[in-house]
Image: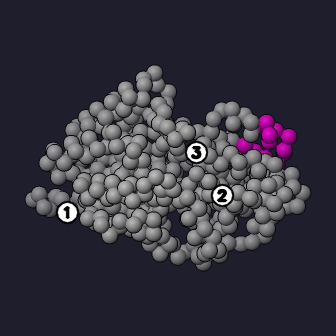
Amino acid sequence: MFYCQNLLGMGHLVRTTEIIRNLVKDFKVCLIDGGQIVEGFQMPEGVEVLHLPAIRAEDKEIKVVNSSHTLEEVREIRKRKLIKVFDDFQPDCLVTEGYPFSKKKSLGFELVPLLQRIKASGGGTKIVCSLRDIIMVKQYGDRAKAEKERCELMNQYYDTLLIHSDPKLHRLEENFSLTGELECQIKYTGYVAQSSPESIEFTLEDIVNLNRQEPTILVSVGGGRLGHDLLECVIDSAAIIDSHLPHHIQIFTGPFMPEEKFTHFQNLAADKSNITLQRYTPNLLSYMEKARLSISLGGYNTTMNVLKTGVNSMIYPSNKDSEQRIRAEKLEQLGILSVVRPEDLQADIFAQKVIERLQILPTTSAFGRLELQGAQKTAQILKDLVQSKVAIAA
């Protein structure tokens, strides 16, 4: 049983899905998805999916998605559904994506009762935290208190912590000071890189875009709730770039971009023949493999796509997320990509950076030094964990 909650973008769901793709070979898998549904998103065959009434984050508050229920009503419905699916499914292992290291305040209302139910059931369900490479660094409030609370939850309920990182690049103790006090086993899996869809279905738009003769600059901003300043700058600088090194700019705004923002960018790009603007494609890897340059935010999954494809890349870390900045700057030091900083988001400065980056090849030898088999290794670790439980029971 795998619990995943996207509150802002869709990165957590992408990483979870990649892990599940490897789990269904050996396990019956139930995915609990608490986020906004992404139209066109492909789930591996054979996975049982339970969609909880969706919630999302907006302006530091939790909001209900497309429901007449209040937030309190939705919380109660979700809590009951979680307990019921556990009772019905009786998993050998529960995996919580991110929690309790991320979204502790937002999701504790339903996950703590679930964890208590599992422990009280006495069935021996193993409990695992699936954690990306870099946890959010608390910039305000009592960080020591927050770390202590997370450590206590891990020690009270969890058997294993899986960190989806290559420890050569980033280790947990770099931004979690109580790593040494965690009592569960800690395992680094390597990075979870997205695989190509099991059955690729190209739309007519995909066919046209992927068969363009002009070299392509690919621009993406994940789910689309962030990165609007980057898109504005790309569109403003398109004419300058075109006058120096003609390219076609393919922009994906993300499925969660507000409609008024999407319309705004459509209007900005309307008179620029070298820009194609769309919301979403499940075939982003195909676009990345074709692109001469990828310009994007620095979310985990987009960065893994860069590492997997070896595409020339510029990354603009979201200014709301120090995790993106830490990862991008480490990769910049390896020569894998270049980092775009807020002061670079002026049309003339940005265009010059793009032109310079198009003339540089990334250090391809650095790509091969990083472990990208995290999904496969995660599946093997979980298989070993469940088998050890069965052996003890026997």
Q: Nearer the viewer, mark 1 or mark 3?
A: 3
Q: Is residue 327 left or right of residue 373?
A: right
Question: Residue furthest toward the left?
Answer: 394
Judging from the image, what secondary structure is the residue with disc 3 in? loop
Q: Is residue 244 left or right of residue 132?
A: right
Residue 242 is drawn in which quadrant? bottom right
Residue beneath label 3, please? 223
Tell me what residue is drawn at x 67 percent, y 72 percent: 362
Residue type, label 3 = Gly
- For label 2, count other residues whose C-alpha is less than 10 Å away and answer few (under 14), some (14-19) or many (20+): many
- Pointer 1 or 2: first along the chain: 2
Q: Quadrant of the C terminus?
A: bottom left
Residue type, label 1 = Ser
Residue 32 is drawn in which quadrant? top left
Residue beneath label 1, please? 388
What is the x, y in percent for residue 294? 68, 59
Question: Residue furthest toward the bottom?
Answer: 365
Question: Residue furthest toward the top?
Answer: 68
| Contact check, label 2 and label 3, Cβ < 8 Å | no
- Residue 89 in view: no
Q: Nearer the viewer, mark 2 or mark 3?
A: 2
Residue beneath label 2, please? 316
Q: Of residues 134 and 378, which is closer to you in this image?
A: 134
Q: Which residues are magenta?
A: 266-277
What is the x, y in percent for residue 106? 41, 42
Q: Is residue 122 left or right of residue 334?
A: left
| Contact check, label 1 and label 2, Cβ < 8 Å | no
345 in relation to 60, above or below:
below
